[in-house]
Image (cartoon, rainbow, N blue to C red):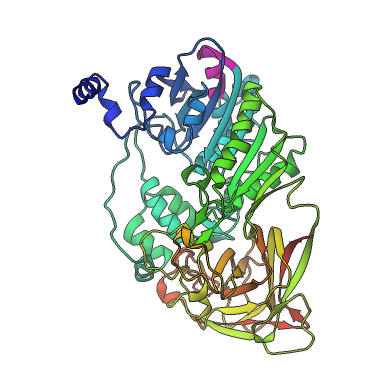
Amino acid sequence: MKKTIVIALFCLPVFLFAGTPADSLWILNHYTKIERQIPMRDGVKLFTAVYIPKDETEKHPVLIMRTPYSCAPYGESRFTDRYSSRGDSIYFHRNYIMVYQDVRGRYMSEGNFEDVRPFVHYKYSTAEKLRNKGKIEIDEASDGYDTIDWLMKNIKDNNGNAGAFGISYPGFYAMQTALSNHPALKAVSPQAPVTDWFIGDDFHHNGICFVLDAFDFYRNFGVPRPKPVVKYPEIPELFFDDNYGFFLKSGSFNDLKKKYMGDSIKFWNDMANHPNYDDWWKARDGRSGCYNVKPAILVVGGLFDAEDCWGAWNLYKAIEKQSPNTSCRIVEGPWFHGGWKRSAGERLGNVWFQEKTSDYYVKQFELPFFEYYLRGKGNDDQIKEANIFITGENEWRQFNQWPPQNVSASNMYLQPGGNLSFNVPSSSNDPDNYISDPMKPVPYTENVHSSRTREYMTDDQRFAARRPDVLVYETDILQNDLTLTGPVVADLFVSISSTDADFVVKVIDVYPDTFEYPDSLKITYPMGGYQMLVRGEIMRGRFRNSFENPEAFKPGEVSEVKFELPDVAHAFLKGHRLMIQIQSTWFPLADRNPQQFIDVYHCDEKDFVKCSVNIFHDVNHASKIILPVLK
């Protein structure tokens, strides 16, 4: 028997030994892979790998993923385990024509790459091109259109229906492809889509650079590519075990540039040169073209996505508002970034969700969506407008709109003595105070580690509650369940001793002191009194009235700082407490504010100053958290 196996293996192509999945042999037997340079309207050619079913008994739908991360491996005789590991094998086994494309200017595609390339609202007609000396307007939507058009005309046995999908940056390209409105494009699923890199996704939250992610990403991704390549140049590795210590010692954003980035990382420098929400940033808002969208849309996001949590919620809302006739629905589960394809989805860190939510998602939502719109099979009746997993109660719920219609914006007020209640403060009282020191910032997690964790989105916050520069407000023990479904709004009245400061607000579920998980889960972390982060967000005070036109604080003068936290879907159960924590640093997740009204991106560490922060909670300055309470 052993001899038979050895002989058979030596008859197989060498590439099957290169870490390929168990079903690679199946794909080899059932698919033909071709690689083509597909011409765009301006003559640039985009490298595209097409997997075509050998089955000629029926016509097949086309499913496209456009990516800046490479459609490797290159070579028509080579397959990859990525198609299995990210869940695409389910479509291979249903005889979809699977298409993977390097976007313009990345890897083997021609042209120049531009991060979150702006959508061109008005593209020249043929006659106008002549009048404009041959100028041809392109964007990611036009590249998507030209790709689909070529596939429909050149790939035999396609059924005339195309779909697009992708997670994270590929989610941005999926949505831009949707904006092409090619008549063959019937269904698109932007998943954890990059949407707005200034307001809420990846590298900025409310104008604050998320330096830990930005530095790690752009030091590699931002390396220039002089010509099409199968592999980008390698850069020297940085070795450190403690990211808090590394970034603290590295200094300011400007210091990081001088030491590690230089002038070659274009987007890093572009960020520094556009500190406010100007036209440059607005043009890169992935929602700007979401009008009159023709294909059906299924937006997918993770409730605990550390990268693009904001994007999924707000892309869905933009389509609903700007393109009301579009069939647009949203699915949100208890996942980290891409967790619906990269995990079972039954736990994150120390928090258990009681079921394998990823399997449920694929079977109930994604697969029926594409099967219905691209193959005409089954129906999509089970995919409601909003399909949301409510953590805490750990159940899927479906709503006819999001936020749900029966949600009440309920004010929960900060109270003296660290209390928190729905009652308006009844009298005048002194504000709470802390000193924010940018040289001793509050860490975003208590663990020592090199890379940013995905688990911090549900981490225990007891470590932060013990710090003197973190204010803590807590309800009494809840006598009834309190379910939140929608965005949370922080409305703070503050005064500071300097001219600028950041404000972090964290919404936390405090477990009963006696809480324990079943022994079968083998979760050894002490869960009694666990302070689960449900949602946290940071706001740069200078943007409190306008992201376009920042304003300095007047030291000692009371100002209102009001901002929105990304949507939540969580039930605070009877017997738990709801906690709010407020602080001014969240390091090294968020870059430090020098706490002066100066250029954050070009200042040096010597410009950092301490700031005394007052948070008011009296009858005339009633700081509150506006909760979306589900009735």
Quadrant assignment, res 537: bottom right
Q: Position of residue 226 (x, y in %)?
A: 34, 36
**Left or right placement of residue 542 versus residue 265 in this view:** right
Residue at image coords 37%, 27%: 24
Image coords of residue 261 (percent x, y): 35, 55
Q: Nearer the viewer, residue 262 or 149?
A: 149
Image quadrant holding the C terminus, namely bottom right
Q: Is residue 356 above or below residue 154?
A: below
Most prominent secondary structure in the magenta stretch?
Answer: helix
The image quadrant of residue 578 is bottom right
Indicate the position of residue 623 as horizontal and vertical percent values.
71, 76
Outermost residue, top direction? 57
Residue 193: x and y in percent read 56, 44
Q: Is residue 210 above or below residue 619?
A: above
Horizontal placement of 144 versus 72: left or right? right
Bounds of the magenta segment:
146-159
